[in-house]
Image (tube, rainbow, N blue to C red):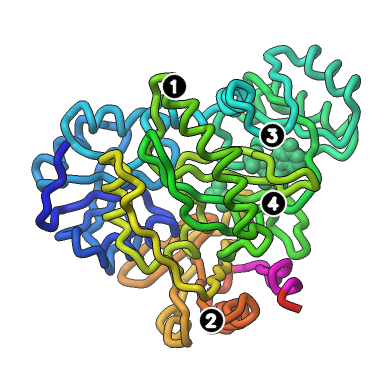
Amino acid sequence: MQMPDAPFPILLIGSGGREHALAAAIARSPSCSRLFVAPGNPGTAALAQNVVLDVADHAAVADFCRLMGVKLVVVGPEAPLVAGLVDDLEAAGIAAFGPRRIPAQLEGSKSFTKALCTECGIPTAAYARFEDAQAARDYIRANGAPIVVKADGLAAGKGVVVAETVDEAIAAIDMMFSGGLGAAGEAVVIEEFMAGEEASFFAISDGTDAIAFGTAQDHKRVGDGDTGPNTGGMGAYSPAPVLTPELEATVMREIVLPTVAGLKARGTPYVGVLYAGLMITQGGPRLIEYNARFGDPECQVLMTRFTGDIVAVMRAACEGRIRQAKASWSPDPALTVVMAARGYPGTPARGGAIEGIAEAESLPGVTVFHAGTALKDGALVASGGRVLNVTARGATVREARDRAYAAVDRIRWADGFCRRDIGWRAVAREG
Ligand code: AMP
Ligand code: GLY
């Protein structure tokens, strides 16, 4: 799977704000001669060529790559990874950045990750897995609350209930086992509750080794003050001040590198972005979960700070020489505010007109990434739950936050809402 030294065409898979941010970084790489995004969104259309491809049809993706001379496929979201898109592209002789089907189980199956943690001595919450509701209820009664109930499969961020009481935990078990989350809830993992501050840690692995690739903190709850239901993420900032350089070294040594070594030893090496969701507890960093991709919206703030050549980094990972990759970052923090459509994370209001993005982007340090937008008769409209990621850099998190909210206030969209407190922990730390 040779990638040429001359610039080559690249295909990026996905349609969210993460992919708009990745598209911007890939498009500015000297290695990229032409960028396709499948399916993309109106934001990626301004930087790349959006293409209609059935991503579930792996042979069709490989045919497209051959036809267009694509030498690298970058997979944004988890579903195609878990479905084995990378395995099938590689079998067709096309390099792809992202883990193969089995190592992508780090995200696809909570019990896969838990078993690997046990095998490799990675610090995480104690847990048990159940396929039987009564046994799960008994375990909860025996252990008490707070306790955490998780659907074992992929549930788009909605399969986790942090239960404050035994009754709440049992209600979650009943919901999952009665099919409330579809097949994702056929088995559940019940975990010890970990207290601390959460942070996201990113690494890029070549299957044998890994480099740290930035930190961020996101805001999962829909409402101000971290209230209301969980979402895919309502805003984020990078870096995460809670992760000091010493803690970052601990995370690499105790969590990331043992994971990479463990998967390699099993004969299923992990190539791609390893996104560790961490709890920084009194006893040090512990793993909450892994994702097999960049976070969304964390990617938007990472790519805003990244000053290197992302294609060179991805290529080094695919070619087994990640140590040679150079990751350089702006020291300035970046912060993004997600504008979502009324109704999210339930059924979002669709079709409302959005104006003012150019005015928002005229402010210093501001970029607006598109997520769930579409063009209708030439006008920009909302077409999803999370719709825009209003992103800003600043000398401090406070400045980045003030710039991002000034930009939010330039956007005219009747159905849109956002949290007003993104970055509160980091701003409080700045004093
Ligand atoms: P997950 O999808 O596994 O990241 O879980 C979603 C959210 O639930 C996390 O971001 C945490 O806020 C919370 N959470 C998950 N597992 C635990 C745990 N063992 N202890 C405390 N909070 C947890
Ligand atoms: N923002 C959380 C995630 O991407 O999973």
Res 335 seen here: yes
In percent of width and height, residue 194 lies at: 78, 40
Residue that numbered label 2 is attached to: 407
In percent of width and height, residue 415 lies at: 58, 68
**Residue 428 part of the magenta-drawn span:** yes
Residue that numbered label 4 is attached to: 198
Respond yes or no on whether mark 4 lies under 8 Å from ligand 1. yes
Residue stretch rendered in magenta on the structure: 417-429
Q: Nearer the viewer, mark 4 or mark 1?
A: 1
Q: Earlier in the sequence, mark 2 or mark 4?
A: 4
Respond yes or no on whether mark 3 lies under 8 Å from ligand 1. yes
In which quadrant of the rendered view does residue 234 lie? bottom right
Q: Earlier in the sequence, mark 3 or mark 1?
A: 3
Taking the spot 57% from the left edge, 78% from the top edge, the residue there is 400
**Residue 266 part of the magenta-drawn span:** no
Q: Is 99 displayed left or right of 290 in the figure?
A: left
Ligand 1 image-quadrant field:
top right
